[in-house]
Amino acid sequence: MLSVRQFAQRREEFFRRGVELVRVFHSPLDALRSYAHGKHAIALPVLADPEKQIYRAYGVHRGLRDAFAMFRPKSLGRVLEAYRNGLRPRLKDPIRDGMTGRPADFLIAADGKLLRMQRGRTFTDSLQPQALHGWLDDLKIGAG
């Protein structure tokens, strides 16, 4: 959730570049309701994809290696950063695969074409806002 909040805080930057941010969780809709309303609400559109249809559509599959991603050294720094920001990562939680999952970030054109993708090496390895700006600059999308 840390990267989701970081993107939500900078949503206007991307909107000015002509990019709409949408967060897809492979979670049931009921588990995401608190992120649309209430104290945990985030300022981004959120989609429920419990069957991981979007991941599969863009060629991302979960394997045995994903279950051990939480043991990589890089994960600890992001876990500590999340704790400092009031978030509490768990082994499993209702909105994602918890510390056993690996994120995938996509830049998708309006026509559905995949422009870029990053598959995280650990559950903490989500694309950061500055890296997305880099993708947009490389592709000459919006004001750089």
Image (tube, rainbow, N blue to C red):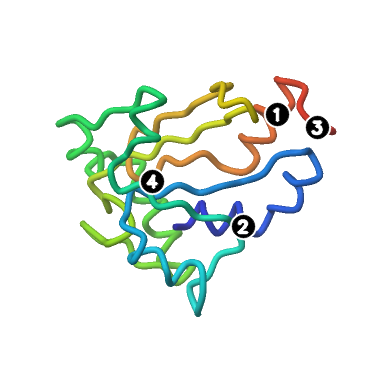
Sequence-wise, which precedes: disc 3 or disc 2? Answer: 2
Within-10-Å neighbours for mark 2: few <14, some 14–19, many 20+: some
Sequence-wise, which precedes: disc 4 or disc 2? Answer: 2
Residue at the spot of label 3 = 142
Separation of marks 3 and 2 at Cα, in angstroms: 18 Å
Residue at the spot of label 4 = 124
Name the amino acid, label 3. Gly
Please tell me whether mark 1 sits on a helix, a strand or a loop. helix
Sequence-wise, which precedes: disc 2 or disc 1? Answer: 2
Sequence-wise, which precedes: disc 4 or disc 1? Answer: 4
The residue depicted at 32 percent of the width and 39 percent of the height is: 52
Indicate the position of residue 31 as horizontal and vertical percent values. Answer: 33, 65
Name the amino acid, label 1. Leu
Among the 4 quarters of the image, the one containing residue 44: bottom right
Sequence-wise, which precedes: disc 3 or disc 4? Answer: 4
The residue depicted at 46 percent of the width and 41 percent of the height is: 126
Separation of marks 4 and 2 at Cα, in angstroms: 17 Å
Residue at the spot of label 2 = 8
**Identity of the residue furthest to the left in this view:** 64
Within-10-Å neighbours for mark 1: few <14, some 14–19, many 20+: many
Please tell me whether mark 2 sits on a helix, a strand or a loop. helix
Vertical order, 41 against 110 (above or below): below
